[in-house]
Amino acid sequence: MDLGLSAILMLSAVVVMMTLWFVTSSTGFPVYALAAVVSLVGINIHVGVTIYFSRIVIIFFLLAVLIREAMGRRVRVSTEVLFPYAKLFGLLLMVQCASVLLSDHVLDGFRQIAIYLSLMALFFTVVIAGSKAEIVTKAVKIYLAVGLVQGLYGIYQVIGGSHGWPTYQTFMDGIPTANDRTSNGFYYSGAYQAFRATGFFPADVSHYAGYLAGVLLLAIALLISNRKSLFLHLVIVVCSIGLILSLSRSGILAFVIFGLPSLSYLLWRVQPKPQRSFWILIRSLAPLALVGMMLGTMTVVTLNIDVTWVSDAIYSRLADVVEAGENQNESMAEHIRTRLLGLDALESSPIYGVGPGVNASPWLSETYQVGWGGSHSHHINILGETGLLGAGLEWLLMWMVAKYMWRGLFVTRESSAERNLLAGMLSAFVTIVLGNIFYFYYLNDFVWFLMAGGVALSRAMIVEAQNSTIYKTKIPVEAGGLGAVSAAGTTYITNNL
């Protein structure tokens, strides 16, 4: 039999088996699968297009939905939650398409829009499948487990780089992959004569740092409810070390400036006794810091590692933020320049921008006489690429997601692990959104998983609280769910999932 035909038959058999698996699996299985793979961006297959694990999960989920519909097993969808996002997604895509058609890089622009489409599909998959709080909670635990692996692997890269240890790229030799800027799986910084941690984000060390910042916030939030969890302690210690070894200014600053303050504030708000959360947080993190220092010292002594470069590098990179351009080994001056180019693109076309896809087809700035291929800030990027109209719609989407998560935090006064988890998801989202001032994390799959997971968890908590209230007060609710009003004038949402 022809080799090509054999490969097609084998691939078809795998597709059929996986689709059947999704059809017969539990409702939350797609959420669990996505939680495990959204950060493994380095493991992909590039055959004209880049096939990520997350895309495969979404395709199988959609096939399973179609098959279940054909079998009469209807998929319950909370339309009152999804429709506002669907409408906004539609408007955003229309503006992006108009911006692309008015640009001089149509093909590359539509490739960028295709990325948005895949992220929107991921968002809807998690919101639809994450219909219960326990599903999202379990998915986050899987997400944290992969985060622990990411942290360990980042540490491994820093130590193993000089020893020539194998990486996952070693085992993928011959398989075409995309966006790998490492050398044999290691990212070496010539400015510091040292290796940096990138994990399974081989194209961008700062994406790795932004991801770990979110993992840390989730783990800290859950630790408030489960202070004896060895797993959470390991996640916090290992991922903290991974974040530091990344030497990413944007990730470290986002975590310190936006992450910890927002999480502290949210935990203070959701606790019945506000001061209790702060004391628990301090008592939980202080031993972790001590254990982390002890483990780090033992590792350094055992492996005879010179770590003076870490403090020197971090100081140099943060000092460059204040005095950009003073240190020629740093890059802040260049980052400021790309931001100015982005603002110049906005000025040239303030309504629709110069079109998405400038990272592949740079836009020529007549003011600076140089090409603009994107800024180290997602917010500047969307302003320059899609103008005030596109940026405004995207900021509205960010606001809607944050507002819905905020709503779920206060449907009950009772302290619970789910409530703390939602506070952690909201703080991680706030950290990433505001961190996009420093860098561009927003178009990563893990960001949209956190967005959708937060919306799904908030919805599940709202429904549970409303149903509990209806049951306790025995107030009849009209069929149809949304908009049923009690005699007291309270609006309830029934479980229309």
Image (cartoon, rainbow, N blue to C red):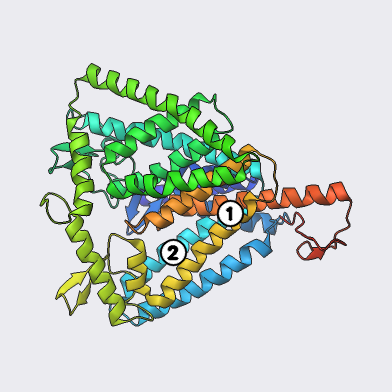
In depth, the one of 147 and 322 nearer the eye is: 322
Q: Residues within 10 Å of mark 2 (few under 14, many from 20)?
A: some
Q: Is residue 71 above or below residue 13?
A: below
Q: Nearer the viewer, mark 1 or mark 2?
A: 1
Kindly identify which residue carries mark 2: 116
Give the residue drawn at x 29%, y 30%. 156
Residues 272 and 65: in front is 272
Coordinates of residue 120 in the picture (x, y in percent): 50, 61
Does residue 219 appear in this view?
yes
For mark 2, give the secondary structure.
helix
* Percent of width and height locating residue 20: 60, 46
Nearest to N terminus: mark 1 or mark 2 = 2
Residue at image mark 1: 405
Residue at horizontal 28 percent and vertical 59 percent from the top: 376
Q: Position of residue 229 (x, y in %)?
A: 53, 26
**CA distance separating discs 1 and 2:** 22 Å
Does residue 468 appear left or right of residue 31 in this picture? right
Mark linked to residue 165: none
Q: In the image, what residue type sits under mark 2?
A: Tyr
Q: Secondary structure at mark 1?
A: helix
Query: As rendered, which of 318 and 472 lies closer to the eye?
Result: 318
The amino acid on which the numbered mark 1 sits, given as a three-letter code, is Met
Residue 282 on image: x %, y %: 48, 31
- Corner quadrant of residue 493: bottom right
Name the residue located 55 percent from the left edge and 48 percent from the top edge.
16
